[in-house]
Every structure is written in C-alpha cells, then in structure tokens.
Image (cartoon, grey):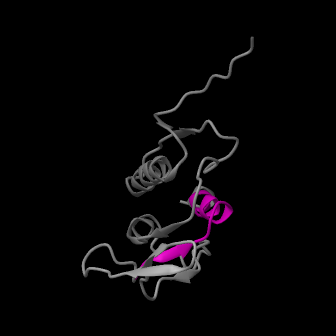
Amino acid sequence: MERYEDEADVVVVGGGPAGLSAAIRLMQRAQQEERELRVMVVEKAADVGGHILSGACLEPRALEELFPDWRERGAPLNTPVTKDVFGFLTEKGRVNIPIMPGEGRGAGRVLEGVMGCLKGTVQWPWYQKI
C-alpha cells in the first residue's frame, strides 16, 4: 500500500469554518512576522466545506477580522438581514412569535441560502490570497 507523506509546521484537522479560520489566521500572522510557515489542512470530504448541511444567518465579524475587504473580494454573502420575523409553522399557516430585544437579533448579519451557498461561503476564504 502506498501512503502519502508530507511535512508541515502546523496540521489543522477539519476544513470547516473553525479549521479554515485557524489556518488562515496562522498564515496571516506568519506573513506579518515575515516567517516561513507551512500549514496543512486535512479534510475528510472531497473538498473544503464538503460537510456543510444547511443555510445560516451569519454574524460577519469573524470574516471581517480575517478579510476586512471580504465584500470587495466577492465573498458569496449577498443578502443583508434587514429585519427579524420568527414564527411557528403549522399545517394551516404561521403563528408569529414575538422577538425579545437583545443579542439574538439578525440585523447587521448576512444570510446565505441552503446547502451549496453555505458550502461556497465556507470554501471562499480557502481560495483567497493571504
């Protein structure tokens, strides 16, 4: 059996949002400090973000910390949240649920659609030049 072998300074297990954020931030820090650093991301899916299952309402703060110019770079986050509406769906319609003021609100966040869109959002940072 032939096995793949490689060397790295840091190995990040998992190509989801947390793993990619860690790898990107490490590379940014190394670049700022003018240090050579080899970071490897190991992902069990065929491609980065391959196991993302659903859409989400995202707080873009973490993305802005990694890539302050993410909008100009064309990140696939195109739907700003302008208001919150919550409801309980029944067989005959929807019953509105009041929203309490506070941290759980969506305004200022961005929406991404189901399946492929969120996968694209997770993959997008992977292809950015650091």
Magenta stretch containing residue 82, yes or no? no
Rendered location of residue 86, percent (x, y):
42, 78
115 to the left or right of 34:
right
Rendered location of residue 64, percent (x, y):
42, 71
Count of numbered circles on the image = 0
Q: Write the start and end of the magenta stretch as one range.
A: 108-124
Q: Is residue 30 above or below residue 60?
A: above
Magenta stretch containing residue 120, yes or no? yes
Considering every residue shown, the one lying at the far bottom of the view is 82
> Could you say which is closer to the camera, residue 58 or residue 67?
58
Whether residue 16 is visible here, answered yes or no, is: yes
Instruction: Name the image quarter holding residue 42.
Output: top right
> Could you say which is closer to the camera, residue 24 or residue 88?
88
Q: Residue at x 39, y 53 (%)?
A: 29
Rendered location of residue 68, percent (x, y):
45, 73
> Could you say which is closer to the camera, residue 40 or residue 114?
114
Considering every residue shown, the one lying at the far front of the view is 92
Whether residue 69 is visible here, answered yes or no, is: no
For the N terminus, the image quarter is top right
Q: Residue at x 40, y 78 (%)?
A: 106
Q: Residue at x 40, y 65 (%)?
A: 62
Considering every residue shown, the one lying at the far right of the view is 1
111 to the left or right of 86:
right
Instruction: Name the image quarter holding residue 54.
Output: bottom right
Q: Residue at x 42, y 54 (%)?
A: 25
Considering every residue shown, the one lying at the far top of the view is 1
> Could you say which is closer to the camera, residue 52 or residue 68?
52
